[in-house]
Every structure is written in C-alpha cells, then in structure tokens.
Amino acid sequence: MGFSLAAAQCLVAPPYVAAGIIMFIQAYLADRMHLRGPIVVVNALIGLIGLPLLGFDKNNGVRYFGVFLATICANANVPAVLTYQANNIRGQWKRAFCSATLVGAGGIGGIIGSTVFREMDAPGYRPGIEACMIANGLILIIVGVLTLKFWRANKRAASGGKVIEGKEGFRYTL
C-alpha cells in the first residue's frame, strides 16, 4: 500500500487485535445463545465485504479497513467452525477424528493459498481474492444446508422420531 517498512510493521498488529476481540465476543454470544452456525455465517459475510475492499479498491484507507474485515473473518471463523463441528458430533473418538480432519483440511488451505496468491498477480492478487470470496460463499451454502438438516433432525427427534447420534435427548446445535 506504499507504506514504509516501519509503518507497515506497525500496521500489522491492529487487525489481529480486532480479530481477537471479535473472537471473544462471538464465543460469549454463541455459548449464551447456543448457536454456532449464525456466527460462522456472519464471519463469512464479513469476509465477503472485506475481501473486495482489500483487493479491488484504490484508496489505501479503504483497503486497510478491508484488511481488518478479512482478518476478522479468517481468524474468528477458526474457533467458530471448530465448535460448530464439535457440538454436533457425539463420542470422544469420533469428535477427535472429525476435529483432526477439519484442522487438516484447513491446513490444505495454506497449500491452496500458495497457488492462488501468486507473485505474478501482485499487487492486486485478483485470483487469490476471488478464491477466498468463493470459499466464503461455499461456507454460506454449506452452513445453510447443514442448519436446515440439523433443524429437521432436531424437530423429528423432538416429536418422538429417529434418535440423533444414538443418544436419547441429543440435539444438534444450530
């Protein structure tokens, strides 16, 4: 964005501080309301606002605000997605396997990032920004489908239908 090295170094920390604050607020609200999916959706929407600001706007102030939103999205969705998954799986070993798979799949994102954020695309990195926007769009679709599935299963179990996860009284967290 044209800042000196020292200024750029000073501007790195504030987006992460903001993301940390948002993570704590979201964790508190999600625990209090017993909702996980909406938090994941809000973070994806924040990313869909921040990424285009970061990648496509010409004003450095707007782009830096986009950095805040994109950082919040990326960092706050890690614990939100992990708890969404963990709350909806019963059994210690099954939950551990699913959590490891989820973290491993997240690690694959780093590999993908190295192929879509190419040096030849600098300074805008359009393919990388677009790939991240597509990923956030997929998050919206997947969480929407899972929430509908979980809501229907909870409704069916509450009316005396099929028991969820083989445990009477277990309900999915939406």
Image (cartoon, grey):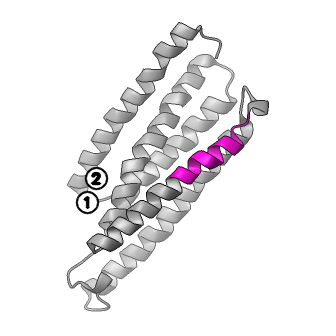
Which residue was labeled with disc 2? 30
Instruction: Return the x and y of residue 117 as percentages of the image width and height.
Output: 69, 38
Q: Residue drawn at (28%, 86%), measured in percent from left and top?
A: 166
Which amino acid is tagged 1?
Answer: His
Which amino acid is tagged 2?
Answer: Ala
Q: Secondary structure at mark 1?
A: loop
Asked whether, in this view, residue 46 is left or right of residue 31, the answer is right
Quadrant of the frame with the N terminus: top right
Q: Which mark is residue 34?
A: 1
* Majority secondary structure of magenta residues: helix
Q: Residue drawn at (32%, 91%), measured in percent from left and top?
A: 162
Instruction: Return the x and y of residue 112 as percentages of the image width and height.
Output: 64, 49
Q: Residue drawn at (55%, 62%), measured in percent from left and top?
A: 141
Q: Is residue 127 above or below residue 14?
A: below
* Magenta stretch in the rendered image: 107-118
The reply to whether the C-beta atoms of the residues labelled 1 and 2 are less than 8 Å apart is: yes
Asked whether, in this view, residue 75 is left or right of residue 60, the answer is left
Graded by Cα atoms within 10 Å as few (under 14), some (14 to 19) or many (20 or more), the crowding at tag 1 reads few
